[in-house]
C-alpha cells in the first residue's frame, strides 16, 4: 500500500552514492516513485529540495520506460542508429544491429512496423552507441521476448560501468544486480 503524506509531514532528504561497477536494482510496487527517482538520477527532473551532484567524469545514458516510443517511425532500423551514432561508430552499425537480433533485411524495416520488443531492442542499441560509465535502465525488458532478454542480460553482464535498473523481472534482478534499493 502506498503512503499519503499530509502537508505537516516532512520527507527527510537522503544520500545515494553510486560507485563504479555498482549493479543496483530499484524495486517496489507500481506508483512508489521508482521512475521518478530514475528521472532525478538522470537529471531529467530536478529535486524539489536538496541537490543532485554528479561525480567527476560521469557519463550517463538513461533508458526511460517510454524510450522505444520516441523512435521516429519513418526511419529504417539502420538509419535510426546511423542518425544518432558518433562518426567512429557508423562502420560498426551492422554488427551492433546483429548483436541486437536485427539481421539481413530486418535492418531495412521502417521503425513504424516493428513490434514493441523490436522497438525496445533498437532503443537500447541506440543508447549504447554513446560511451557511458553509468546506465540507468527503467523497465528495459518491457515487450522483450526470451532471446532479447538474454541478449540484454549478456550486454549488462559485460558492461564495466555502473548499472541502476528498475524492473519487475526477478530473474533479471538475480542475474544483473548485486544490491537492492
Image (cartoon, grey):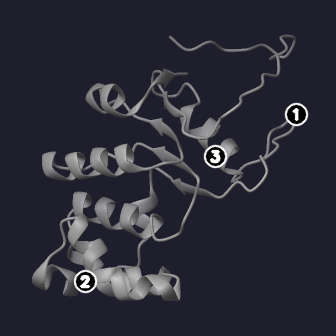
Answer whether residue 74 is visible to the viewer in this image.
Answer: no
Of labels 2 and 3, earlier in sequence is: 3
- For label 1, the SS is loop
Q: Is residue 134 left or right of residue 13?
A: left
State the image coordinates of residue 39 (x, y, percent, origin top left). 63, 46
Residue where numbered disc 2 is placed: 110
State the image coordinates of residue 17 (x, y, percent, origin top left). 71, 30
Residue where numbered disc 3 is placed: 39
User: Along the line of sight, which residue is nearer the eye, 89 or 62?
Assistant: 89
Label 3, label 1: how many angstroms apart (C-alpha)? 15 Å
State the image coordinates of residue 158 (x, y, percent, origin top left). 37, 49
Task: Residue at 38% x, 81% y: name it.
Answer: 80
Residue where numbered disc 1 is placed: 49
Q: Residues within 10 Å of mark 2 (few under 14, many from 20)?
A: some
Query: Is disc 3 in contact with disc 1, using a CB cutoff of under 8 Å?
Result: no
| 163 over 29 or under it: above or below | below
User: Along the line of sight, which residue is nearer the eye, 35 or 125?
Assistant: 125
Label 2, label 3: how many angstroms apart (C-alpha)? 29 Å
Q: Residues within 10 Å of mark 1 (few under 14, many from 20)?
A: few
Label 2, label 1: how many angstroms apart (C-alpha)? 43 Å
- For label 3, the SS is helix
Q: Is residue 28 left or right of residue 95?
A: right
Quadrant position of residue 12:
top right
Amino acid at each position: 500500500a502506498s503512503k499519503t503524506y499530509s502537508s505537516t509531514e516532512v520527507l527527510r532528504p537522503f544520500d545515494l552514492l553510486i560507485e563504479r561497477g555498482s549493479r543496483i536494482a530499484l524495486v517496489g510496487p507500481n506508483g512508489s516513485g521508482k521512475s521518478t527517482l530514475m528521472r532525478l538520477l538522470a537529471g531529467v527532473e530536478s529535486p524539489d529540495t536538496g541537490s543532485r551532484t554528479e561525480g567527476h567524469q560521469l557519463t550517463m545514458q538513461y533508458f526511460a520506460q517510454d524510450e522505444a516510443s520516441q523512435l521516429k517511425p519513418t526511419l529504417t532500423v539502420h538509419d535510426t542508429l546511423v542518425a544518432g551514432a558518433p562518426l567512429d561508430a557508423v562502420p560498426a552499425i551492422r554488427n551492433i544491429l546483429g548483436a541486437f537480433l536485427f539481421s539481413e533485411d530486418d535492418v531495412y524495416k521502417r521503425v513504424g512496423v516493428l513490434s514493441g520488443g523490436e522497438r525496445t531492442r533498437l532503443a537500447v542499441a541506440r543508447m549504447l552507441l554513446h560511451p557511458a560509465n553509468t546506465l540507468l535502465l527503467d523497465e528495459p525488458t518491457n515487450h522483450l521476448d526470451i532471446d532479447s532478454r538474454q541478449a540484454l542480460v549478456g550486454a549488462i553482464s559485460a558492461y564495466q560501468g555502473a548499472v541502476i535498473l528498475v524492473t519487475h523481472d526477478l530473474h533479471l534482478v538475480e542475474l544483473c544486480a548485486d544490491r537492492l534499493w
